Image: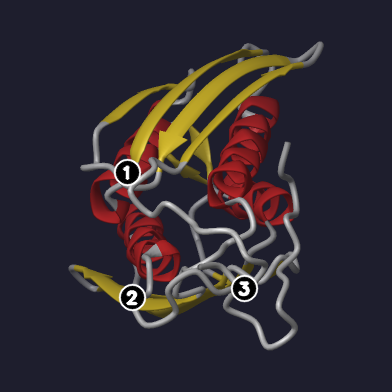
Amino acid sequence: MADNGRAVDHCKPRLGRIERTTRETDVRLSLGLDGTGRCQADSGIPFLDHMLHQLASHGLIDLEVRARGDTHIDDHHSNEDVGIALGQALAQALGDRRGIHRFGHFSAPLDEALVEVVLDCSGRPHLSYGLALTSERIGSYDTQLVREFFVAVVNNSGLTLHIRQLSGVNCHHIVEACFKAFARALRMAIGIDPRRADGIPSSKGVLEQAGAQ
């Protein structure tokens, strides 16, 4: 039984679905935390789609993203709103975060690049971002948008997220290693802890549900 007297069915799929429409973007995003890594990504930003595929594949998250936005101006609004929707869907799928490991840590290499990600499904949004991207663009993608994407995810999911670049020269390698490390750390954190059963992974007995809808 759960610590509030109700049983939790860990066989029930943990799903999140967000529809977000503004004057600048129209985003439809759904995810399943207990998936196999299937991904359909059409954000209007090719490099972001590539990174979303990394997140799904290495996090074993089933992810579908469709976004239309004012990319004729630049990619900023679509990039940010996909991050917002992803964070909200993650918070929705996690619910009260009952039974999860909560913490995750992974270091991912890609050739000369090595990036470490440590995260906590704490309900308290915080980002420490340490990527040193020396190129302004990866293809047509503005490298400043990497940080903006993770700001949006963190603020809407309630993650405490630390990203550290340990080595790297090629910006594509650095960013891809970051997304792979984030995916694996998240996979670890959201996994069900069999020893915790149905308990909340906090000495307070509650975790906030930032961004949940």
Q: Secondary structure at mark 1?
A: helix
- Relative to residue 167, is residue 145 depicted above or below? above
Labelled pair 1, 3 in contact (Cβ < 8 Å): no
What amino acid type should be assigned to the residue bearing mark 2?
Answer: Pro
Decide which of 126, 10 is in the foreground and name it: 10
Q: Residues within 10 Å of mark 2 (few under 14, many from 20)?
A: few
Q: Which residue is disc 1 drawn over?
A: 56
Tag in front: 1 or 3? 3
The residue at 48%/28% (across/down) is 30
Image point (75%, 54%), residue name: 210
SS at mark 2 in the image: loop
Report the residue marked by disc 3. Answer: 3
Quote the CA–CA distance across marks 1 and 2: 24 Å
Whichever of labels 1 and 3 marks the residue nearer the N terminus, that label is 3
**Mark 3: amino acid:** Asp
Give the secondary structure at mark 3: loop
